[in-house]
Image (cartoon, rainbow, N blue to C red):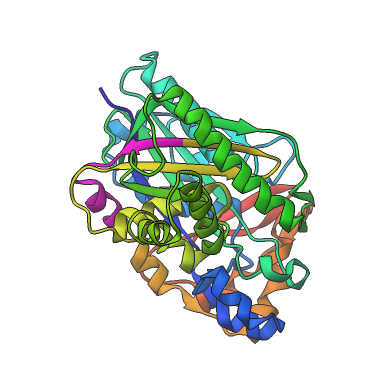
Amino acid sequence: MGYGIEALNVYAGIAQIPVPALFAGRGLEQERLANLAMHNRSVGLPFEDPVTNAVNAAKPVVDALDPADRAAIEVLVTSTESGLDLSKSVASYVHEYLGLSRNCRLLEVKQACYAATGALQLAAGYLASGASPGAKALIVATDVALVDERAAYAEPATGHGAAAVLLSDRPAVLELDLGAFGLYSYETLDSARPTPEFDIADVDRSLFAYLDCLSNSFADYRLRVDGADFRHTFDRLAMHTPFSGLVLAAHRKMMRESGASLAQAQEDFERRVRPSLAYPARVGNLCSGSVYLALAGLLATDPATDAVRVGLYSYGSGCSAEFFSGVTGPGSREAVLAMDIGGSLDRRRELDFAEYVRLLPESLRTLVPAENRTVDVERYEEYLPGDRPLLVHTGTEGYHRTYAWR
């Protein structure tokens, strides 16, 4: 019996700004735009937060289940760098607004952009143990973007939203290669969020750590999987994507280490990696949901119809990394397309730079604790889509966050 991803959905907000417009508005060097290799960046609005992102990503997955399958979700884990409380987890709110069974384990985990993969692997091991036959686990990676002009070139690359991954013994999207993984972790301060209002980053340290962890986590994978080879074992690759240019550099490094020429590396990149960048180039870095955004883009845009083995790389600052793999099936593409992720990206409202700057200060307040606050959702009514209900953040009452369906 196989275990892995039964369903996968991504919510990337309802607004976006073209990255060239953001570059121009901030006065950033245009020649660096090509290395970023991004078209648009998802933008959070003042009534969105980690809870709304998580629920809006997971709701289509949960709604597609029959009542018995919905009741089988007995593990719910949220991974986030954007925690709302030092004790109460985001998962508690997500569980409530998804209407899941009360016979459910709730957890929130944190390890920068790696946390969702750590949760996925631990949950998959639990399901495969047979301790609770027929159980399902829901992992939701959710974050908001706390960036403004202080972030410089990280501002256009930082995304907004959530990825929802349902695990079970019916892996319609990706059957995990259980036991086939490689790990590499150590302490470094390449990025951090010392307050609820902004991020800090050592860009050079972060890039080198990402590349170092890819080489070493794959080396550990090879120790566990006899005969594994970066160039030939995997039909496709999906990596954590802070920006597409870094994935290109990482792929070239691995290909060079395996003896490939630059021309061979470029051909291989176009065939095995390029499809996975389709959605990240339109959203930005989704933190721990990033590798699953890449996987969704790969499955939605890759023309392959046969079963293929996918190598996946997950990296989180601080730092922790994992290289793992799984196999897609003939129905994997249809399972992802059924979520209409691409259509949702198309329907986001495009902001101009002046509108973006006007909304940004209020959006950045979403994680700042307040005993009482009202979010005037009516002020932003024009941004809400009329084709589907969305959960919105309406304020706090006695530090208890409040939400409503709009």
Q: Nearer the viewer, residue 42 or 370?
A: 42
Residue at 58% x, 85% y is 352
**Vertical placement of 270 versus 223: above or below?**
below
Q: Is residue 63 visible?
A: yes
Residue 176 colored magenta?
Answer: no
* Res. 35 image quadrant: bottom right
Residue at 67% x, 85% y is 25
**Which x, y percent locates residue 199?**
75, 56
**Which x, y percent locates residue 279?**
42, 62
Q: Is residue 93 visible?
A: no
Residue 332 colored magenta?
Answer: yes
Left or right of 256: which side holds 344? left
**Vertical placement of 36 versus 128: above or below?**
below
Q: Nearer the viewer, residue 138 or 205?
A: 205
* Res. 85 image quadrant: top right
Left or right of 296: which side holds 305? left
**Which x, y percent locates residue 141?**
53, 46
Residue at 43% x, 56% y is 261
Residue at 47% x, 68% y is 282
Q: Quadrant of the N terminus?
A: top left
**Vertical placement of 370 versus 157: above or below?**
above
* Res. 91 image quadrant: top right
**Which x, y percent locates residue 59?**
40, 49
Q: Nearer the viewer, residue 327 or 213?
A: 213
How many marks can you see? 0
Query: Range of the magenta residues?
Result: 324-339
